[in-house]
Image (cartoon, rainbow, N blue to C red):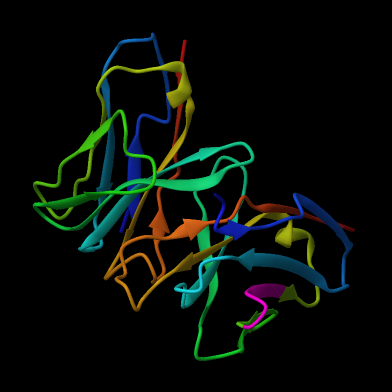
């Protein structure tokens, strides 16, 4: 099992550009989530999904879109990048929900100039 | 409004001694708590959890204590080893009002001194 994979590992964007951060898991987990980690802020939930076709907002959803067309994939789209979105992004999955052990990907470091 | 707080950004402990990491929460609806460990350039990994119906949970060298009346939990690592040097995040969720959202603290960087 590859676990949770994220691509790319690093990305630099200009303000206003759009892009998609990819996340995939091969553990057949129903629950998937996206977090961002900023200095002094811990990890903050952006969006989550409890199964294919079902998504909902977390704590900091503005500027991001998600979709879940398959169990395996949960891409995160930045619609119009802003410097405030400079962060490290982590995708995670778990069998049943946030309160159980979540498996995190290695992260994507995004810089918006 | 930080609902889960880790007031010590960093902690240094001698190898072999006990490491105690603290976490406070403000939302009384939280009823499940977890600790995650994170090495640089890696994603967090799950360490240990505790339900609010318990006040202690052990797993090898790691023990988590929960004091519901004080809204406080702590992670004890005994004995501390160099490989324990990492950032530790506590996190909380409310099973009683759904299982979808996890709120993290800001993390404590633990350094084990050989």
Please give the name of the residue rendered at 74% of the width and 74% of the height, measured from the top-left corner: B77
Horizontal and vertical percent for residue B22?
A: 72, 67
Q: Is residue B92 above or below residue B50?
A: above
Q: Quadrant of residue A62?
A: top left
Q: Does B71 appear in magenta?
A: yes
Please give the name of the residue rendered at 24% of the width and 56% of the height, measured from the top-left corner: A26
Q: In which quarter of the image is residue A11?
A: top left
Horizontal and vertical percent for residue A31?
A: 25, 61
Horizontal and vertical percent for residue B107?
A: 64, 52
Please give the name of the residue rendered at 73% of the width and 75% of the height, measured from the top-left corner: B76
**Residue A36 relative to residue B96: left or right:** right
Q: What stretch is highlighted in magenta?
A: B69-75
**Residue A106 relative to residue B20: left or right:** left
Q: Quadrant of the N terminus of chain A?
A: bottom left
Front in this rendered view, residue B97 or A44: B97
Q: In this view, does B30 lie above or below A9?
A: below
Q: In which quarter of the image is residue B24?
A: bottom right
**Residue B84 relative to residue A4: left or right:** right
Q: Does B65 appear in magenta?
A: no
Give the mark count. 0
Q: In this view, does A37 lie above or below A12?
A: below
Please give the name of the residue rendered at 39% of the width and 8% of the height, measured from the top-left corner: A14
Front in this rendered view, residue B72 or B1: B1
């Amino acid at each position: 099992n590859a676990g949770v994979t994220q691509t790319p590992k690093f990305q630099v964007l200009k303000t206003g550009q759009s892009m998609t951060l990819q996340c995939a898991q091969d553990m057949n987990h129903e629950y998937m989530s996206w977090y961002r980690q900023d200095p002094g802020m811990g990890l903050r939930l952006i969006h989550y999904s409890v199964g294919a076709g079902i998504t909902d907002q977390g704590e900091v959803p503005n500027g991001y879109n998600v979709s879940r067309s398959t169990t395996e994939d949960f891409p995160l789209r930045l619609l119009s990048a802003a410097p405030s979105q400079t962060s490290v992004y982590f995708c995670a999955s778990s069998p049943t929900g946030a309160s159980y052990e979540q498996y995190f990907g290695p992260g994507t470091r995004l810089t918006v100039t | 409004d930080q609902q889960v707080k880790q007031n010590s950004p960093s902690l240094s402990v001698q190898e072999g001694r006990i490491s105690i990491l603290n976490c406070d929460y403000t939302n009384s609806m939280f009823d499940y708590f977890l600790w995650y460990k994170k090495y640089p350039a890696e994603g967090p990994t799950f360490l240990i959890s505790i339900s609010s119906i318990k006040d202690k949970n052990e797993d090898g060298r790691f023990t988590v204590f929960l004091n519901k009346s004080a809204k406080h939990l702590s992670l004890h690592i005994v004995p501390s080893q160099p490989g324990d040097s990492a950032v530790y995040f506590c996190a909380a969720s409310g099973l009683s009002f759904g299982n979808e959202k996890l709120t993290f603290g800001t993390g404590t960087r633990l350094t084990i001194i050989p």
